[in-house]
Image (cartoon, grey):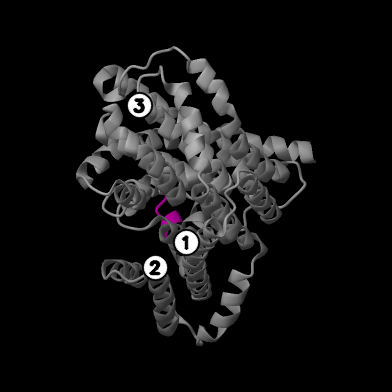
Amino acid sequence: MIAVAFALLLIFICVGLPVAAALGLMGYVLQAKYAFFPMTGALGELAWNSSSDFILIALPMFVMMGELMHRSGMSEKLFQALTPWFARVPGRLIHTNIAASAVFAATSGSSVATAATIGTVAIPNMDKGGYNRPLFLGSIAAGGTLGILIPPSINMIIYAVLTDTSVGDLYAAGFIPGFVLAGLFSLMVLGICLWRPAWGGPAVAADGLWRERLAGLKHLLPPLGLFFVVVGSIYAGLATATEASALGLMATLGLVWANGQLTLRVVLHAFEGTVRATCMVMLIVIAAFFLNFVMVSIGLIKAITDSVLALGWPPLAMLLAIVVFYLILGCFMETLSMMIATTPVVVPVLVALGYDPVWWGIVFVILMEAALITPPVGLNLYVVQAVRGRGAFGELCAGALPFVAAMIVMIGILIAFPDLALWLPRQLKAVAG
């Protein structure tokens, strides 16, 4: 049964079926072959129950926030405001790419939206400044991945639904690792540009820098304010994750209106982008819930868990094997489908080995970040290439590799110091209690 399940998944991926169709068809084949009674009759109820989950209502609202910021030009002002702060640091605009991605991630929750938005603003400055092209492009693709680690995160919401984990705990757990990872990215860029000074762009005069920095602060306040509205309301106990997403969307609409950008064109484009993203995600979620229902009913998840535990490996060895498995799988599978297809199987194994599901959620998100910038299926690579419009795809892949190494280092840090992710959720629970 286990071999059949993995063979089906591999076949459906290789033939290029859409993710939702592959998951749904896999569930249908498994129930037809191993179930004692037809389970397709439960599909309607499963579709309703999975798509009407209160937590999932936050998805389109977070997507809409990012769309509005992108369409209204707020992201461009954010980039320009951050640029003077890194003007004297080796790497200059490359650090700005990472910092802008981190700040934008704190309002959008989407890696693709972050990479596309920052790439649109940053890439025109790449050749103008004489930066190393692979490193510059890699920083945009890698910086975009912070959109699913720094809260609010769409992927964390789906993980919470699949594992019955608190969204608030996941957001708190991702906060410190998210900014530490952004710091690792910048530290790595700094080291490379100190080693190869010509890669870090032209020198910038110090005259007037502080004036530019202070003048740009007004453009940094709106995204930071949105972050505190969304995340602050959750941690203060004033709102659930769904209610906080509604507050954030209303605050974003207010900011866009105050900037004079709330036009019918902006709103319609934001609606279109939101509907496209939400429909894609929800169709995958419904198919995944059906597949999960089938796997639990026929005993497949228990069989896999028992088989893995029967190997007798130490927990750390098993964890490292799972990490390597995901690093390889991420090269060939889209991140959302990878998460939805494997979480119901892997999380029970890790919990049985004694690992915290919230901690694993953060490690898992970083593994998904790595998958976003590893060819041949690294989605952020294709997003940046599309924004770029021309040039060799290979140099973009090469530029992303150092950032994958930084992610692996981050995973090692979390394994060695799990409290880096778990300390803040515990403190917030203690304050709330």
The label number, if any, that marks residue 297 in the structure image:
none
Q: Residues within 10 Å of mark 2 (few under 14, many from 20)?
A: many
Residue where numbered disc 2 is placed: 19
Q: Amino acid at mark 2?
A: Val
Q: Is residue 33 magenta?
A: no
Q: Percent from the top left, x then y, of residue 302? A: 50, 65
Looking at the picture, which amino acid does disc 1 mark? Ile
The CA span between labels 2 and 1 is 10 Å
Q: Which of the two labelled residues, at mark 3 and mark 2, occupies the earlier sequence position?
A: 2
Residue in the image at 58% along x and 27% along y: 217
Q: Position of residue 298 (x, y in %)?
A: 49, 76
Mark 3 = which residue? Answer: 189
Which residue is labeled 1 in the image? 340
Q: Which of the two discs, 3 and 2, sits closer to the camera?
A: 3
Of callouts 2 and 1, which one flags the residue occurring earlier in the amino acid sequence? 2
**Amino acid found under the numbered disc labelled 3:** Val
Decide whether residue 308 is among the magenta residues: yes
The relative height of residue 30 versus residue 432 in the rendered view (above or below) is: below
Quadrant of the frame with the C terminus: top right
CA gap between label 3 and label 1 equals: 33 Å
Task: Relative to 17, say whether 423 is above or below.
Answer: above
Quadrant assignment, res 319: top left
Residue range of the region highlighted in magenta in the rendering: 306-312
**Label 2 secondary element:** helix
